[in-house]
Amino acid sequence: MKYVLPFHFMFEHMKRLAVISFKGDEEFEGYEPQFFDDPVNGKGIRLLRYRNNGKVDVYYENSIIYDESFSIGAGIEDCQMIRFDKNIFEINAYGLQIHLAFTDAQGRKNELKVQENSARKYPVPFLAPVGAGVEKPPKLFFVYMNDFDFAYRKTTQIHCSIDSRILEPATIPFLIGGHRIYLARYCSRLNIVALNPDHSNPFCFDSMPGKTIQQNEAQIHCNMEGKVEQIQIGEHLHSAILDFPNGFPNLLDLPENQCITGSFDIYLSSAKITGGQYLLEKTEDQVRVKFDQFKQWQPGKLPWGYKLLMTFLKFFRNWPTSYSWEGTVDLAEIPLMEGNWQNRRERMAK
């Protein structure tokens, strides 16, 4: 029995991530070094430099495979392959260790140095709000950090300069885990998942009611009614689940000209991240599909300082709620899918 579902659910790869924010600079808000080591992205460092106007600069080593469709924030400004004169980005038992130096597209010498020497670290699982400021999202993108932490001010030195201009590191005005901290955060155990990237194909597989099958990296559970109860990729900390409490119907079995609705939940690393509603309507060999009404992220038990942080910076929890996806699936012999994501909050902010 052939199934067709309007989903493309996939892992993306990154080994390490850090975001160092600055305050009061005339041009930039922060730097984000990323380290990759996989066949898709290559091996090395890609550095994002966030501008005050929402644009983002991208600098990457020649060993990195750059994706021309990459999009973030209000769009890409500078994008350049470079050689890092200093090239250190590590996360060890004492915290964050960075020393990067490069010449930017304007010919200026950039240097970022972070040396942390904290004897005890208490990382927590945390969802990065990567989708909060994306004006034209190419996908619904979840970055779940299983060992998220901040750099402690007492035991960390941060230096950042552009030529002779010094950037001052931003701080948070309350304690996190009993420590004063810089707004410098990092992670080395990432679980990154994308839902329905642009130009995705629908999910097609063969199964029978009541069966659980393995299709490539996905495990699919079908109930006795022929509906899909769950799609899982990976396992344990490196896992992602689409769960349908009342089952998701096979698009090939939909009745004509009826509006079918239901709900779904998304889990990463066994933690519930968000959920939403779906709408399906079939006309002849085409199905209109909509995903919306995404819920806030509901984190589990977190230290008091993290809860205070999310009280003041509500976008940490709220950002998924502004997303929606609408598209169509053509039920041809080889099914095709077209659709796109919208970020209502960014659209209304204009």
Image (cartoon, grey):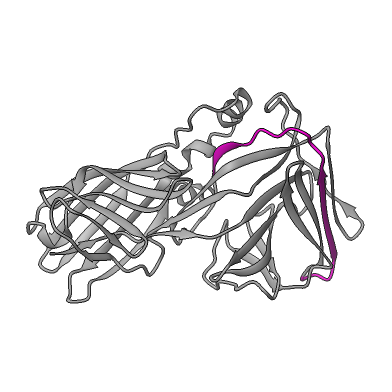
Tell me the quadrant of the picture where the N terminus can be found. Answer: bottom left
Q: Is residue 192 left or right of residue 81?
A: left
Q: Is residue 160 left or right of residue 260?
A: right
**Viewer-closest of 315 and 184:** 184
Q: Quadrant of residue 196?
A: bottom left
User: Does the magenta segment cover residue 2?
Assistant: no
Residue 139 sits above or below residue 175 on the image: below
Q: Is residue 82 left or right of residue 56?
A: right
Image coordinates of residue 281 in percent, x first then y, are: 16, 56
- Please give the name of the residue rendered at 31% of the width and 55% of the height, measured from the top-left corner: 219
- Please give the name of the residue rendered at 66% of the width and 33% of the height, measured from the top-left corner: 122
Magenta span of residues: 105-128
- Asked whether residue 43 appears in the rendered view, the answer is yes
**Viewer-closest of 103 and 194:** 194
User: Does the magenta segment cover residue 121?
Assistant: yes
- Please give the name of the residue rendered at 88% of the width and 54% of the height, measured from the top-left corner: 165
Image coordinates of residue 314 in percent, x first then y, are: 53, 34
Residue 327 sits above or below residue 224 on the image: below
Image coordinates of residue 146 in percent, x first then y, are: 55, 42
